[in-house]
Image: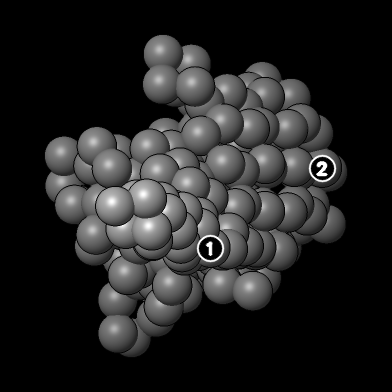
């Protein structure tokens, strides 16, 4: 009996270890924001920006955005998608970076700034797209980050999010 109990305990420990080892590593994403990337028409600006994100445990996407040198104050910043097959038309807003109630903030009203936050992909971060669809779009470079300014209401700098 004692031998069976030890074997059962060893089996349980092995299963627990296997479960711990099966955790997927985080997935990282990035984008370089430039006026030349704007859709449907490029913008002439010296402004630049970056977007970095990590998709970790429990489908939580943690991100950071920076931008500098806008020609006028920022007034919006979003993730847009899905990018259309032609690739040159603007896509709809999926995630607003100015959403403190959901853990997302961005500098507005300035020509340079930062943003950060989390997006819980399990709960479907938007009414227009499911969490599974959002992950597919993220993994296939079908989403972009856009920082809008007073001078360029449609967006001054844009970067396509790519998986690293």
Say which element carries label 1: helix
In this view, the residue in front, 57 or 46, is 57
Check the image and report above or below for 136 versus 81. below
Q: Residue at x 57, y 41 (%)?
A: 62
Q: Is residue 41 left or right of residue 92?
A: right
**Which mark is on residue 21?**
1
User: Can I make out residue 99 in this image?
Assistant: yes
Establish if 39 lies above or below 100.
below
Distance from the alpha carbon under mark 1 to that under mark 2: 41 Å
- In the picture of the structure, the residue carrying the numbered disc 2 is 68
Q: Nearer the viewer, residue 37 or 32?
A: 32
- The percent position of residue 36, horizontal first and vertical second, equals 66, 70
| Scheme of image coloration | one colour
Bin the neighbour count of mark 1 within 10 Å (Cα to Cα): few under 14, some 14-19, many 20 and up: few
Q: What residue sits 32% from the left and 58% below the top?
A: 4
The C terminus sits in image quarter:
bottom right
In front here: 54 or 160?
Answer: 54
* Residue occupying image coordinates x 63% and y 32%: 116
The answer to whether residue 90 of the structure is visible from this angle is no
Residue 129 percent coordinates (x, y):
19, 52
**Extreme front residue here?**
1
List x then y, in percent, for residue 17: 50, 58
Task: Decide which of 87, 72 is in the foreground and name it.
Answer: 87
Sequence-first tag of 1 and 2: 1
Residue that appears at 42% across and 54% down: 6
Q: Looking at the image, is mark 1 or mark 2 nearer the viewer?
A: 1
Total labels: the figure holds 2
Residue 137: mark: none
Mark 2 closeness class: few <14, some 14–19, many ≥20 residues within 10 Å = some
Q: Which SS class for mark 2?
A: strand
């Amino acid at each position: 009996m004692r031998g069976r109990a030890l074997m059962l305990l060893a089996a349980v420990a092995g299963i627990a270890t296997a479960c711990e080892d099966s955790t997927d590593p985080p997935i990282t994403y990035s984008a370089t924001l430039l006026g030349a990337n704007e859709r449907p028409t490029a913008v002439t600006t010296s402004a630049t920006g970056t977007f970095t994100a990590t998709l970790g445990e429990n489908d939580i996407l943690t991100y950071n955005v920076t931008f500098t040198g806008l020609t006028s104050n920022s007034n919006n910043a979003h993730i847009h998608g899905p990018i259309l097959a032609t690739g040159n038309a603007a896509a709809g807003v999926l995630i607003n970076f100015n959403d403190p109630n959901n853990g997302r903030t961005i500098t507005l009203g300035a020509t340079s700034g930062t943003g950060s936050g989390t997006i819980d992909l399990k709960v479907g971060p938007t009414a227009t797209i499911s969490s599974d669809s959002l992950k597919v779009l993220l993994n296939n470079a079908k989403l972009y980050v856009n920082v809008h300014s007073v001078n360029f209401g449609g967006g001054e700098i844009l970067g396509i999010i790519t998986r690293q």
